[in-house]
Structures are given as C-alpha cells and as structure tokens.
Amino acid sequence: MLISVIIPTYNRKRVLGDCLGALLRQTLPFDKFEVIVVDDGSRDETKSVARSFIKNGFNLKYVRQENQGQGVARNAGVAVAGGQIIVLIGDDIVVRNDFLEEHLRLHLRHSGENEAVLGFTTWHPKLTLTHYMQWLTNGSSVLGKFGGHQFAYEKLKNQIEADYNFFYTSNISLKKSLLEKYPFDPSFSGYGWEDIELGYRLYKRVGLKIYYNPKAIGFHDHVMTEEGMASRMRSIGASAHIIHKKYPELNKVPPVWKKLIFQILSSGLCISLFKGIRNLTQGKCSSMYYYALSKKYFLEGLKESPSLSYN
C-alpha cells in the first residue's frame, strides 16, 4: 500500500459523500491507496455514508471516536493506516481525479522522511464567491502582507518550497513514519493552530521540507460567511495561548504594543469607517473591514478557553 488518505469528519454527511465520491474516481489504482474516515463523534448518518463506499475494490476504513477534535482524529487514522504516505484532507475537499497521482509523483522525487508535499486548494467552482470568501484566501490583501486566515497560496507563486506556515491539513501529504514519531498535539481541541504547531515542530526537530505541487488540486466545498467569522476567530484566539506556551518565539499571543494596534483597528469607530468604505465600493474595498473585524474577534478569543469546532 502506497497511500493512506485520512479524513476527519463531524456531522457533515453530505460533503463527506462528495469527498469520497471524488476519491472513488482517482486515476491511481485502488490497490495503491486506502481511505480512512475518522468519525469524531458524529450524530448524523456519517457512518452509513462512509460504509456505503466500501464496495467494488475501493479500500475504505471507518474509525469512530468520541468528539475530541481534528488533531486527535488524524492521529487515530495514522494508527490504523497501512500506507507509506499519509495524505491529509478535509471532509469538505473534493479532489481532482489525478490528485493522488500528483502527490505521489513528488514523493517519488522527494523520498526523504522529512519531505512533505503541499497541494493547491481553491474554492469549488460550483460556489458563488463573495468578497468575504475571496478575502479569506488572500493573505496579502492588506499592505501586501496581511489578510485572510484560510489560505495564502498567492505567496507561493513561482515557488517550489513552502515553510511551516503552509502546513495546510486540507491538502498535504507526509511519510507515515514521520507522523508516527511526531503526532498532532491533542492539546489543540478547537479550531486553529494544530496544523501550524505540527509544521513548526517538524521544522525544528527534523528540518521539515515542504514541496509545493499546484497540480495536486482540491476544491473546497464550503460556503463561508461573515457571520461565521466570530466563532472561528475566537477559537483561533483561545488556542493561541497553547502554541504561545510551547513556542513563545512565534509571538502568536501578540505583545502589548501589537494588541494596542489591533484594539485601535477593531474599535467601533474604525470598523464603522471600514464598513462604510466597503459599502460605498460595493465590496471591492473590503479587506480592511474584514481584517479589523477578524482582529476584534481574535482579541475576544484571547480571553476565552479553547473549544471544539469544525467550521
């Protein structure tokens, strides 16, 4: 077995079905890969959906655990994986037919245990993109350096390698032996940081190299709205304390001067100003509004405790 695809999931039977359907259409032969669905305590028909794909030589394993978060779920998948290479994707990722072949192609070229492959994730073409969704996937929309917190692939244009900040678990692959030695930290039960923490830990411990393959394409089938920003950013803020305690040099809990800047940017006056500009330009100049709003919720999260989230 060459590849094990690990998919943590929680109460999202519809998107999981689409995700598995895309893996069923891979150009890589079925005997070369397996799929492991780790059900993190779902209360819907996730189990039935997953097991309906165990047919016609398609190798699928279903694992269930109590709700403990995505990192713990991925560790459970690694524990039962038979592949030499672990491909990590989300349950809302619908991959292109040659997705696994593209990941494998770079692993055959970069066979070292500390060598990983990052694929490209973009919005599913069936979705209607909003200005907010566009901002989420542009990490350079504010002063060419800051922006949305989902992806920042624009920074990898013409790049062959990526650093630990691009350890995107929606589309990345590593050697199984490496993940067995260095699993996801179970301390991160909420949304945010568990992927960056592992990427940074692997960089420090084994000199992790991440090779970027923009041809390993996954489509993100998840409509995201401004209304959902609050819970996501509060969770990121709460979890920041965990990674800061382990690696204070990363400054994930901002120092006093930076908090002050965030507080000014996210003040009611500034947010109203940025929102007015967004409305006057019909959303074309909305980056500062979303950035300021995200910092408002992030600062609120710094005062909270981490919580489980799959949003």
Image (tube, rainbow, N blue to C red):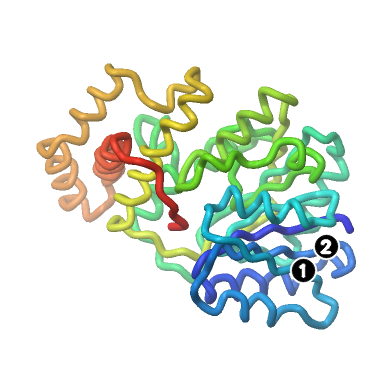
Q: Secondary structure at mark 2?
A: strand
The crowding category of the residue bearing disc 2, from other C-alpha atoms within 10 Å (few below 14, some 14 to 19, many at least 20), is many
Q: Residue at x 60, y 50 (%)?
A: 72
x and y percentages locating residue 74 in the rendered image: 65, 52
For residue 192, side relative to residue 211 (left or right): left
Q: Residue at x 59, y 39 (%)?
A: 185
Q: Secondary structure at mark 1?
A: loop
Outermost residue on the front side: it is 66
x and y percentages locating residue 282 in the rendered image: 22, 55
Q: What label sits on residue 62 in the rendered view?
A: none
x and y percentages locating residue 16 in the rendered image: 58, 71
Outermost residue on the left side: it is 269
For residue 139, side relative to residue 28 (left or right): left
The residue carrying mark 2 is: 33
**From the viewer's perspective, is residue 241 above or below residue 119?**
above
| Distance of label 1 from label 2 (alpha carbons) | 10 Å
Q: Is residue 219 visible?
A: no
Q: Residue at x 82, y 35 (%)?
A: 113
The crowding category of the residue bearing disc 1, from other C-alpha atoms within 10 Å (few below 14, some 14 to 19, many at least 20), is some
Q: Report the front residue among 160 and 263.
A: 263
For residue 174, side relative to residue 19 (left or right): right
Q: Are marks 1 and 2 in contact (CB under 8 Å)?
A: yes
Q: Is residue 165 visible?
A: yes
The residue carrying mark 1 is: 26
Q: Report the front residue among 33 and 149.
A: 33
Three-letter amino acid code at disc 2? Phe
Q: Residue at x 69, y 58 (%)?
A: 6
* Front: mark 1 or 2: 2
Q: Quadrant of the C terminus?
A: bottom left
x and y percentages locating residue 25 in the rendered image: 74, 73
**From the viewer's perspective, is residue 259 above or below residue 197?**
above
Chain-order first, disc 1 or disc 2: 1
